[in-house]
């Protein structure tokens, strides 16, 4: 169910509960879904904000006297850019400072290309009204002009004549305030004649209607000289105008599509409501941003640590290369400094008759081959001059690296059996 709250045309909106007795009352209607064209009011009344009935959706209705409708020329740009240009486009049609106005594009105008219907309302008044509703715990989802609550058929204008706030509404949403003299209804109101003349001056007169649907009270309907009105108002129309006068229902139930109601919503820009879903998304976005920041910091620290280890390894390899070249200046190519140094050392020992334990030499060779996978060695055994190292969970790239290093050494080989990988190093004399 939707609760329509009709604000009064008042400048007195208070938020001080001590002055609650002086706050204005509001008319209200509880109706079905706005998209239902056959809405019938469930109930209606007038009361203070604290006495309003409960509803799952709230639409606040602004009197037409508080809104200026403007037929403005705007470029065909995105909605965001159009909103930025809006106040400049209507500046010459306002009598007040545009910065004090909240303007909303209702939709395209029937007056011509690049024409848009703009609803402008005093920003301070709308802020005060929303603050007043907020003080009573009322948070409307939609705020619209009273003229937006009725669907208007194409090629027709809706005329509502009341004691005050009378209006004429076009199908494109443009509305005109209508002042009239109840004592003289032999001729149509001048404001209505002026509005029709303006429509007749539009491109191809396409904004001009062929039918006027007039809603008014029984006594005013009886006082209207329909023949005189029709003759006078048809002057600018080639086909003429047809007048239809109907009794004004009390209250006049909202009869509008949801699409039109949303397009006429004044809660845009700074007045846009923040839903619970939006709040939740903002909180999720903060949490996601925090998680991403933590992940980025973690990756950065890992990268720095990897870079540091790489630099240390390069430094050690450079030092080993320098030591090897200093010890064996006759060497022309350095591929694996530790392995070449071990070979040269064994050669010098043999030349000088020095003996070394074969297993020590084998362990030195094993250390140079398995330095990157030392943590994955599961078993080491030495028997009959053969040193065997067993591995667990050895990655394919590590296995390939060990194969290459073993082949270069000339004393080692890789054996595989049933998924188990072993590095076999024989004594130098057993090659």
Image (cartoon, rainbow, N blue to C red):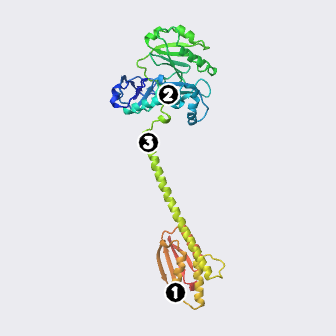
SS category of the residue bearing label 2: strand
Instruction: Kindly state the secondary structure of the residue where label 1 is placed.
Output: loop
Give the foreground label among 1 and 3: 3
- Few, some or many C-alpha atoms within 10 Å of disc 1 (few <14, some 14-19, many ≥20)? few
Of pointers 2 and 1, the one earlier in the residue sequence = 2
Q: Where is mark 2, residue-wise? A: 121
The residue located at (43%, 43%) in the rendering is: 280
- Estimate the spatial distance between the alpha carbons at disc 1 and disc 3, rounded to whole Å: 75 Å
Q: Is residue 48 above or below residue 236?
A: below
Query: In this orientation, which residue lies closer to the viewer: 361 or 115?
Result: 115
Disc nearer the start of the sequence (2/3): 2
State the image coordinates of residue 118 (x, y, percent, origin top left): 54, 27
In the rendering, at what x and y percent does residue 246 appear? 47, 14
Seen at 50% across and 77% down, the residue is 389
Quadrant containing the N terminus is top left
In the rendered image, residue 39, in percent from the top left (x then y), is placed at 43, 24
Are there few (<14), some (14-19), or many (20+) residues within 10 Å of tag 2? many
Dot 3 falls on a residue whose secondary structure is helix
Residue at the far bottom: name it: 353
- Could you say which is closer to the camera, residue 25 or residue 214? 25
Q: Find residue 15 and report its image quarter.
A: top left
Disc 3: which residue = 279
Crowd tier of the residue under label 3, counting other residues whose Cα lies within 10 Å: few below 14, some 14–19, many 20 or above: few
Residue marked by disc 1: 357
Viewer-closest of 159 and 372: 159
- Do the residues bearing badges 2 and 3 touch, measured as CB atoms within 8 Å? no
Q: Is residue 265 visible from the viewing direction of this image?
A: no
| 26 relative to 360 in the view: left or right | left
- Marks 2 and 3, Cα distance to the nearest angstrom? 28 Å
Q: Quadrant of residue 193?
A: top right
């Amino acid at each position: 169910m939707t609760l329509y709250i009709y604000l009064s045309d008042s400048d007195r909106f208070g938020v001080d509960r001590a002055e609650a007795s002086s706050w204005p009352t509001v008319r209200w209607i509880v109706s079905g879904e706005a998209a239902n064209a056959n809405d019938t009011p469930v109930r209606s009344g007038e009361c203070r904000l604290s006495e309003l009935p409960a509803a799952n959706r709230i639409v606040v209705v602004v009197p037409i006297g508080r809104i200026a409708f403007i037929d403005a020329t705007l470029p065909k740009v995105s909605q965001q850019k159009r909103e930025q240009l809006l106040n400049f486009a209507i500046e010459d049609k306002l009598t007040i400072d545009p910065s004090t106005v909240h303007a909303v594009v209702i939709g395209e105008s029937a007056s011509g290309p690049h024409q848009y219907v703009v609803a402008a309302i005093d920003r301070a008044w709308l802020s005060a009204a929303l603050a007043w509703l907020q003080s009573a715990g009322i948070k409307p989802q939609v705020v619209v002009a009273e003229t937006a609550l009725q669907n208007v058929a194409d090629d027709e204008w809706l005329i509502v004549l009341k004691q005050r706030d009378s209006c004429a509404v076009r199908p494109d949403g443009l509305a005109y305030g209508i002042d009239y003299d109840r004592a003289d209804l032999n001729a149509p109101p001048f404001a209505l004649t002026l509005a029709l003349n303006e429509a007749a001056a539009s491109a191809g007169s396409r904004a001009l209607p062929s039918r006027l649907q007039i809603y008014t009270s029984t006594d005013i309907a009886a006082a209207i000289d329909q023949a005189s009105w029709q003759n006078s108002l048809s002057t600018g129309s080639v086909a003429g105008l047809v007048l239809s006068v109907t009794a004004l229902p009390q209250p006049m139930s909202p009869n509008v599509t949801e699409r039109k109601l949303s397009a006429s919503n004044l809660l845009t820009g700074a007045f846009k409501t923040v839903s619970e879903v939006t709040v939740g998304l903002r909180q999720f976005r903060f949490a996601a941003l925090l998680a991403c920041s933590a992940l980025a910091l973690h990756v950065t620290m890992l990268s720095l640590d990897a870079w540091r280890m790489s630099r240390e390894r390069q430094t050690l390899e450079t030092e080993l290369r320098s030591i090897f070249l200093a010890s064996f200046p006759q060497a022309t190519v350095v591929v694996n400094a530790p392995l070449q140094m071990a070979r040269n050392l064994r050669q010098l020992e043999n030349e000088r008759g020095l003996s070394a334990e074969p297993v020590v030499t084998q362990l030195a060779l094993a250390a140079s081959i398995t330095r990157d996978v030392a943590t994955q060695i599961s078993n080491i055994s030495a028997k009959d001059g053969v040193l065997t190292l067993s591995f667990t969970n050895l990655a394919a790239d590590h296995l390939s690296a060990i194969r290459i290093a073993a082949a270069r050494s000339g004393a080692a080989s890789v054996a595989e059996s049933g998924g188990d990988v072993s590095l076999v190093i024989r004594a130098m004399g057993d090659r």
